[in-house]
Image: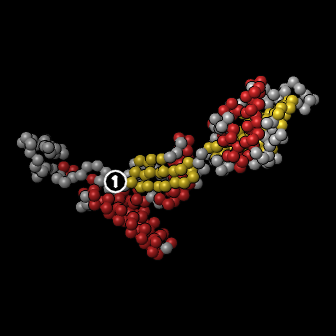
Amino acid sequence: MPAALRGGAQSKAKPRAKAPASPRKSRGSSKAQAGYTPGKLGAAGRLGLSPTHALIAAGGVLAVMAVVALATGDRAERLGQGVQGAVGQQFASLGFRLNAVHVQGASPAATADILSAAGVYKDQPVLGLDLEALRARVESVGWVEEAQIVRLLPDTLIIAISERRQLAVWQHNGASRVIDADGRVIPEANPLRAANLPLVVGQGADQHAAAILPRIAARPRLMSRVEALVRVDDRRWDLRLKDGSLVQLPAVDEEAALIQLEQLDQRSRILELGFARIDLRDPTMVAVRPRDQVRSSGLVADGA
């Protein structure tokens, strides 16, 4: 390729010539000298380091600091952090600056909170990052069950997380919160944006929702009609349906009671017709109170 002289005319080389740049270049054309490496690691050449050697040196520095910290404890760790910061600044001039952060395993809603907690920024010295502290900040986010941080030299950071699955919206004492399958609140999750999640209400509903919800979800005709699952005295559940009907489940053997309800619905399409209340608390019978019946204890259907 012909060599361009900064501030002067181009010198035309013969076809197919691969000779180094002309020795008559002006003093200001150092970038046209033979051996110049463009790109992020170009500065390594000016220090006598090839890009490969620069990467090896960076890895060596990190390994030495890890060994020193393990060998001599907290004091060496503090010293190592100081050295790490200084080295990070030095290598930043060679192109080791943060350019990309990839969050893996997170939903869009969780990703924004994770990046905010991580606190990293573009052009930050990559070798100056404290990965353990960064992992702790990420795992402090309510969405995150577990996190792993990977530094890919020269300029990339990967944050891989296991996200806590949203199970339901829990309503108690006038407040609504999103909970996971273990009944733990996810503080960053907005319940107003969780209309697709089932609603569980009352004291203890957060801890027992994971047991009852799969049983309801396994019955689509019933699940599509449920407005809320209400925990009663932290012992049993009432199902409040969207049409105002009430299904009272027993404190034990909820599955058997739901089978009774399915059988009744298959015979009489009771879920479509509507009712005031179905009492399934007694395993020997199903008591049904129609909407227009006020004083009567209701119809009694065989619970077999």
**Residue that appears at 48% across and 51% down:** 160
Residue furthest toward the bottom?
72
Q: Position of residue 60 (x, y in %)?
A: 35, 65
Q: Is residue 98 above or below residue 66?
A: above
Frontmost residue, 28 versus 19: 19
Q: Position of residue 177 (x, y in %)?
A: 68, 44
**Residue that appears at 45% across and 66% down:** 81
Q: Position of residue 20 (x, y in %)?
A: 12, 51
What kind of residue is marked 1? Gly
Task: Specify few, some or many for label 1: CA neighbours under 10 Å numbering under 14, 14-19, or 20 or more.
Answer: many
Frontmost residue, 166 versus 221: 221
Q: Secondary structure at mark 1?
A: loop
**Residue that appears at 55% across and 44% down:** 110
Q: Which residue is mark 1?
A: 95
**Residue that appears at 65% across and 50% down:** 182
* Left or right of residue 298: residue 204: left
Frontmost residue, 148 versus 292: 292
**Does the rendering let one see residue 34?**
yes
